[in-house]
Amino acid sequence: MEISELLDKQKIVSEQIRDPVLIEVRRWLSEGKPKKLQRLRLPADMLTYWKHLHLITEKDGMLCKKWIKHNKETKEIEIQRFLVLVPESLKVTVLDQHHSSLLTMHPGIDNTCELIRQRYYWPRMRDEVELYVKSCITCGECKQPHHYLRAPLRHVITYEPMHTISIDHIVPSKEGATKRGFRLILSITDVFSGYVMALPCKTRKSEETIRLILHKWCLRFGYPAEILADNDTSFSSEYFNEVCSYFKTKVTHGVPYKCSSTSKAENSNKRINKALRVTLSDKQILDWDLYLNFVSFALNAIRSRHTGFSPNKIIFGKNLRTPLDLEMDGSPLELDKFASKKKTSAYLIYRTIRDIAPVFIPSSADSTNVDKIITTDRTDPDEDEDDERQGVEIEVECTAHIPSVDTTVAETQQQNNRIPGMVTDTIAQPEVVPVNDIQQPEEEAAVPITPPIDPVDTSPTISRRNPPRQRKATSFFNITRLGRRSKTYN
């Protein structure tokens, strides 16, 4: 398998000029859109172009269609692209580039259609992509059917990227070692994002496994908090556990003879083996170690049907640039100004994926344990607004204001002489003391506090535009559902 030749800009323009349907579309752009058409005598593609003529434009001599994505909440334009209209003579070439090339590794129907929609457009693209993938001989020989597979496996709960990884060994070929001496593949998968890394190794020894994990993964993405592995001797040895305990990494082993307990690693192994089968020929079977980087790059660029994003999008916040993203003349595509207008795409992706997994909190947890589980520092003030807007019910530890009672009559008269609706000077804020920390006086030494003789209003004058906020003085109030984070009202 080789990287197919990229389409030339001049070739696309020449083929668009020769295509009979696109000739009429070009004439409509110059002369104007006709009001009526004879639908029974025209091809279906021409009718589709006639309906979307307000989105079709000519850019650098090529016919393109505008693709605009709006934000549902703010109704602002987030992404704007120009998709090239593909003539009939170049459809097979485009399908071959996005399905059978070394950069894609024969993806399925949905992923192939998603890759093509990022750059090209023609009517009823989905039907032609489905027919092309189903008729692919390589996919039919190497991929297994899905009608007899079991029910989907359960997910491992995690809440951030690179927190938990799943590792396993693969034997890609039974014919022995490669020319470089490699016999196995160590697959490392991030449980949160599905990011895959395939590394060649020579033995199953714990020393080599630890060396590959430290040098290839930890020094790039950081040390994981938990490692999921099967009961292989290389993962359950004393040396492996001692190194992991030194770095404060928890090792969790799956159930023996139950591959579903390490489903994330087994799924990555299946995808790596499938990509190698469709890539290598019989003569290249002992050179599989030279193609592992291409396999990892292709798998990490494919959108996951569970999260809705590719692993590269989750980890790096964007899809990595490939040779397919180049323009027809070989220069890179210029991103539109609307593409970088969003706040942070990684922030929105993390919030979306966290909502997929359920939040687990023990039922028998005291107040201190609850603080450890659900209390985190929130640095972004917009997250508070999002939780209030979505109606998230949160258990909150409240604090009470303890105002000073020693207020003199002179101070009260000075406060009453202020102009209504204005704040003339800075008012000292009372000290905030948690209710649980207040020391109650003993009954014998308790002395009642008598109110002032003159009942004068001692509250400071506050602007009508900023009315005082009503707060509850109870120490705890329980709400039915616990949120992911907690707030402390002062």
Image (tube, rainbow, N blue to C red):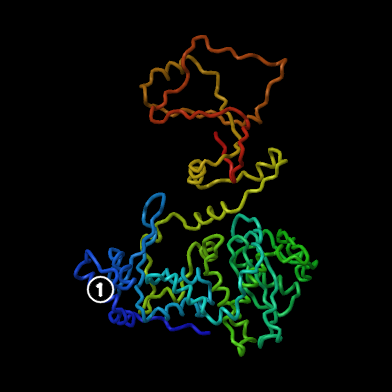
Q: In the rendered view, tell whether residue 355 sits above or below residue 9.
A: above
Residue 207, image x and y in percent?
A: 74, 73
Is 428 in front, or is 121?
Answer: 121
Question: In which quadrant will I find the C terminus?
Answer: top right
Q: Quadrant of residue 342?
A: bottom left
Residue that sits furthest to the top in the current view = 453
Determine which quarter of the picture holds residue 58: bottom left
Name the spot of residue 135 as percent of width and height, x first: 51, 79
Q: Is residue 392 above or below residue 153?
A: above
Residue neighbourhood size for the residue with mark 1, other residues' Cα within 10 Å, grouped as few (<14), some (14–19), many (≥20): some
Comparing 246 with 87, the one in front is 87
The picture places residue 341, in percent across and down from the top left corner, at 39, 57
Q: Nearer the viewer, residue 353 or 236?
A: 353
In this figure, which residue is indicated by the disc labeled 1?
A: 26
Which residue is painted at 40% across and 54% down in the image? 71
Question: Of the residues shown, which amino acid type is indicated by label 1?
Answer: Arg
